[in-house]
Image (cartoon, grey):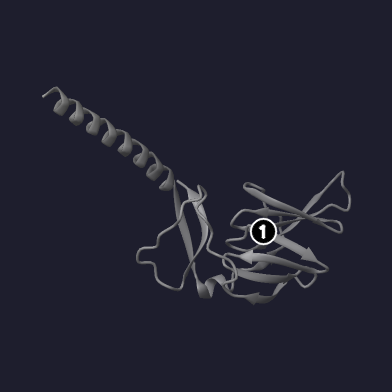
């Protein structure tokens, strides 16, 4: 009788511990929600804005010639004129939803626009080419594998937002 009661208590304890661990990881997963953009709008979403924006969620930083480029995670790239290092000037912003990385060679910036690779002419301030579906979809901030239930094919994940 005591053995049966001990077994029930042990099983109940193991089940409770398992649910606590499972529940907390699920809670972490649901702390973020995915933002999607349809393919047509994604392909029109990379452009230059003449006004600088506030840096709120910085990512990678790149320096080329007199400019500093700061990634604003999932949003685009800040363009900062550093010709006078004592007084850097926010010159503009390259809108690029889903952007988390960039590189510059000559007058061309290469950046990710969610799953696409885009080349952007820094002199002409416009997109010059796009290669579709080069990159995997953006990973969940906590590194979880994302399972997609009934998402339409033409929607592309461009950002994770904390609730």
**Residue 153 in the image, given as x and y percentages of width and height:** 43, 73
Question: Residue drawn 51% across and 73% down?
Answer: 39
Q: Is 25 on the left-hand or right-hand side of 37?
A: left
- Which image quadrant: the N terminus? top left
Q: Is residue 96 above or below residue 163?
A: below
Q: Nearer the viewer, residue 10 or 128?
A: 10
Q: Residue at x 80, y 51 (%)?
A: 89
Q: Position of residue 107 (x, y in %)?
A: 81, 69
When the figure is inspected, residue 131 is found, relative to residue 79, above or below; the finding is below
Give the quarter of the image for residue 43: bottom right
Count of numbered circles on the image: 1
Q: Residue furthest top?
A: 2
Tell me the residue at 87%/47% (across/down): 85
Is 42 placed left or right of 109 in the picture? left
SS for dot 1:
loop
User: What residue does disc 1 label?
Assistant: 101
Q: Residues within 10 Å of mark 1 (few under 14, many from 20)?
A: many
Image position, residue 84 (x, y; %): 89, 49
Residue 11 percent across, percent down from the top left: 23, 33
- Judge by depth and name the residue closer to the eye, 145 or 54: 145
């Amino acid at each position: 009788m005591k053995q049966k009661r001990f077994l029930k208590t042990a099983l109940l304890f193991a089940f409770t511990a398992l649910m606590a661990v499972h529940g907390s990881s699920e809670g972490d997963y649901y702390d973020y929600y995915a933002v999607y953009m349809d393919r047509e709008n994604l392909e029109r979403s990379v452009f230059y804005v003449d006004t600088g924006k506030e840096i709120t969620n910085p990512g990678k930083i790149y320096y080329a010639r007199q400019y500093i480029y700061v990634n604003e995670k999932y949003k685009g790239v800040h363009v900062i004129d550093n010709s006078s290092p004592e007084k850097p000037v926010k010159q503009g912003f390259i809108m690029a939803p889903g952007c988390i990385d960039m590189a510059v060679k000559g007058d061309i910036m290469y950046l990710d626009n969610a799953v696409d690779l885009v080349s952007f002419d820094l002199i002409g301030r416009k997109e010059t080419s796009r290669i579709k579906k080069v990159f995997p979809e953006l990973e969940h901030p906590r590194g979880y594998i994302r399972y997609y239930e009934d998402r339409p094919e033409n929607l592309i994940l461009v950002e994770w937002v904390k609730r």
